[in-house]
Image (tube, rainbow, N blue to C red):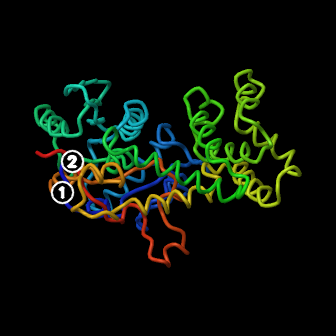
Amino acid sequence: MKCFGRTSISSFLGDFIVYRNIIPIDPRLPSMEEILKTLGKSSLAIPRKTSPEYAEILTALLREARAQDAPGIHIERVLFLGDTRMNDGTAFGNICSAGNWTGMAFIGSEREEPLHTEIIEQNNTTLFLANRWNALEVFIEYCRQMDFHIDEHTLVLLDIDKTTLGARGRNDHVIDQVRVEAATQTVGNLLGGEFDLERFQFAYHYLNQTEFHPFTADNQDYLVYICLILGSGLFDLETLTDDVRSARVVSFSQFITQIDKKTDQLPPELRSIHEDIYSRFKQGDPTPFKAFRYNEYLVSAARMGQLGVETPVNELLSQEILITHEVHQAALSWRAQGALLFGISDKPDEASIPTRDMASQGYKPIHQIETEVVGAIS
C-alpha cells in the first residue's frame, strides 16, 4: 500500500452528490419535491437507496445533472462502483431499470484470500464482484472487451461510504469506529454520571447484530436511542431482548411509543431529548437523533487529513478515513473521457454536512475535506 498524496472527493465530483435525504448539494439541481411534481407524484417518505422509489427520483435528478453539465447529451449507460452485492447491487439494478439504461457495476472489497472475481449477468446489467480494490483495472479491461464505452453518454455512479471513502476490507473499520465513538459521546454526555461505558458498548454491539435488525430497522439513530434508554435504567437489556425474541416487542415504533408513556420516569434532560426524537420519528424523519448525527459529523471530520502524507501507511489505514486510490484514479480517467460523475451516499445529511454554526467555525462538508489517498501500488 502507498499514500498518493491528498485530495477531496469534491476535486473530482464537485457538488454532484446526494446523501440520504436526496437533497442535491449542487444548488442548480432540483429538490426531491420538485422531482416528485415533475413525475406527477405526491410527497412521500424519503426512500432508502435500495428502493425503486429512490431509483426513480435519482434517475430524474441524474438526467438533470447531465443536462446541466453537457446540454443536449443523453445518458445511455451506467457504470457503478460499490462495495456490497446486496445493497449496492440492488440500487444499481433499480437505477438501470428506472432509466432504461444498460449497466456495468464493480462491487469491491479487500480480502486476504487469493484474487477472485465473479461476473453475474442479469437483464441488461452486469455485476463484477472482486475481492481486491486493485481488481478495478481488471474490470476496466473487461468493459473494453465487452465494448462498454466510457464517454459523454456514460453515467459513472460512485458509492461514497466504504467505496470512495474508507474502502471496505481495507479502511472501512475507521468509519465504524467513528460511528461508535459518536454514539458513545452522545449517550455519555446525556447520561452524565450515570453513564456506564462498558454496559453501553455491550448493549450497542449486541443489538447491532442481524438478529435484531427487524426491531432496530438496522437504523443507527434507533439503536443509539435504545441504548440511551437502557442506560437510563428505564429498561434493561435482558428484558428487552426477551421481549423482542418472544415478539412482545416487534418494532422500534412499538418500543418508542411505550417509552413515551413512561416519560415521567425520565430525568428532565432525557425527557426533552426523547420528545424531540419521538416527534421527528412520527414525522417520518429517518434520522431523528440529531445530536448523535451532529457528533458523527464532527468525529468524521476529525479523522480526515489530520496525520499527513508522511505518516506510515499502516497508521493512516488504522486512524483516518481515506480516499480509495483505485477509485480516485478511475474516476479521473472516466471524467477525462467525458463521463458524468455523480456520488451517492446513504449516510445522513446531518452526519455529512456541517450545521450553519459549525460552518461559521470553518467546518466543511465531508466531500470537501481533504484527506490522504491510499491504495495498492500499481
Instruction: Report the disc number at residue 246.
Output: none
Instruction: Return the residue nearer the eye: 150 or 6.
Output: 6
**Amino acid at the residue labelled 2:** Gly
Q: Is there CB contact under 8 Å for labels 1 and 2? A: yes
> In this picture, is 198 found above or below 334?
above
| Residue at figure coordinates x 59%, y 42% from the top left | 201
| Residue at figure coordinates x 49%, y 63% from the top left | 298
3D distance between C-alphas at marks 1 and 2: 8 Å
State the count of labels.
Answer: 2
| Residue at figure coordinates x 65%, y 52% from the top left | 288
Instruction: Locate residue 125: give its quadrant.
Output: top left
- First in sequence: mark 1 vs mark 2: 1
Disc 2 packing (10 Å; few <14; some 14–19; many ≥20): many
Coordinates of residue 63 in the picture (x, y in percent): 36, 52
Q: Residue furthest right?
A: 264
Coordinates of residue 38 in the picture (x, y in percent): 50, 53
Disc 1, SS: strand
Q: Circle 1 sits on which residue?
A: 4
Disc 2, SS: strand
Disc 1 packing (10 Å; few <14; some 14–19; many ≥20): some
- The answer to whether residue 208 is visible is yes
Instruction: Report the disc number at residue 375.
Output: 2
**Amino acid at the residue labelled 1:** Phe
Coordinates of residue 101 in the picture (x, y in percent): 31, 38
Instruction: Return the residue nearer the eye: 75 or 191.
Output: 191
Coordinates of residue 274 in the picture (x, y in percent): 75, 53
